[in-house]
Image (cartoon, grey):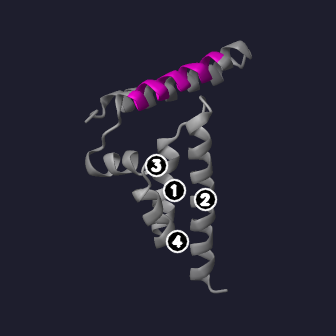
């Protein structure tokens, strides 16, 4: 197997893993969906035209990818869901009594992500 084939196989595995996480995120409230779908599309574009075309043309999975690519749009439902997931994650950390340093880092990172999400157009 050549170096090129190994790299392509790694892109494919990464794409499949992200697709799986995105699908799980569609039903599991603490896991985001769209970022994993975007990553899956990125990885599939480098490894499998067939899977890339399937993903971006899928009737449920494709529209958020298309909206992001075309205009950086994140729908209101996605924004609310992402924010609720981040809040739930932080509250779980509080409940588990993780260290203050971890909470501070988490708060800063999650606040930055929330700002980014809410600063995107909704379309």
Residue 20 picture location, percent across and down = 62, 50
**Judging from the image, what secondary structure is the residue with disc 2 in?**
helix
For marks 4 and 1, the one nearer the N-term is 1
Residue 2, relative to residue 24: is it above or below? below
Q: Which residue is drawn at 56% across and 45% down?
A: 22
Q: Mark 4 points at which residue?
A: 47
For marks 3 and 4, the one nearer the N-term is 4
Tag 2 near tag 1, CB within 8 Å:
yes
Cα distance in 3D space between marks 2 and 4? 11 Å
Quadrant containing the C terminus in the rendered view: top left
**Judging from the image, what secondary structure is the residue with disc 4 in?**
loop
For marks 2 and 3, the one nearer the N-term is 2
The answer to whether residue 97 is left or right of residue 7 is right
Residue 16 has which mark?
Answer: 2
The answer to whether residue 116 is left or right of residue 7 is left
Residue 102, relative to residue 66: is it above or below? above
- Residue 120 in which image quadrant: top left
Of tags 2 and 3, the one toward the viewer is 3
> What type of secondary structure mainly makes up the magenta span?
helix
Q: Name the residue under label 1.
A: 40
Cα distance in 3D space between marks 4 and 1? 10 Å
Mark count: 4
Q: Name the residue under label 3.
A: 61
**In magenta stretch: residue 16:** no
For marks 1 and 3, the one nearer the N-term is 1
Q: How crowded is mark 4: few (under 14 residues within 10 Å), some or many (20 or more)?
A: many
Query: Which residue range is magenta in the image?
Result: 77-91
Residue 77, relative to residue 66: is it above or below? above
Residue 118 picture location, percent across and down = 35, 27
Cα distance in 3D space between marks 1 and 3? 11 Å
Residue 116 picture location, percent across and down = 37, 32
For marks 2 and 1, the one nearer the N-term is 2
């Amino acid at each position: 197997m050549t170096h090129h084939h190994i790299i392509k196989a790694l892109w494919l595995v990464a794409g499949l893993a992200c697709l799986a996480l995105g699908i799980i995120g569609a039903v599991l409230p603490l896991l985001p969906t769209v970022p994993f779908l975007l990553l899956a599309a990125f990885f599939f574009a480098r490894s499998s035209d067939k899977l890339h075309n399937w993903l971006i043309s899928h009737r449920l999975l494709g529209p958020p990818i298309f909206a992001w690519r075309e205009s950086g749009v994140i729908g209101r439902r996605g924004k609310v869901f992402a924010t609720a997931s981040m809040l739930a994650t932080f509250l779980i950390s509080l409940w588990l009594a993780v260290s203050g340093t971890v909470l501070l880092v988490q708060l800063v990172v999650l606040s930055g992500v929330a700002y980014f999400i809410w600063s995107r157009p909704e379309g």
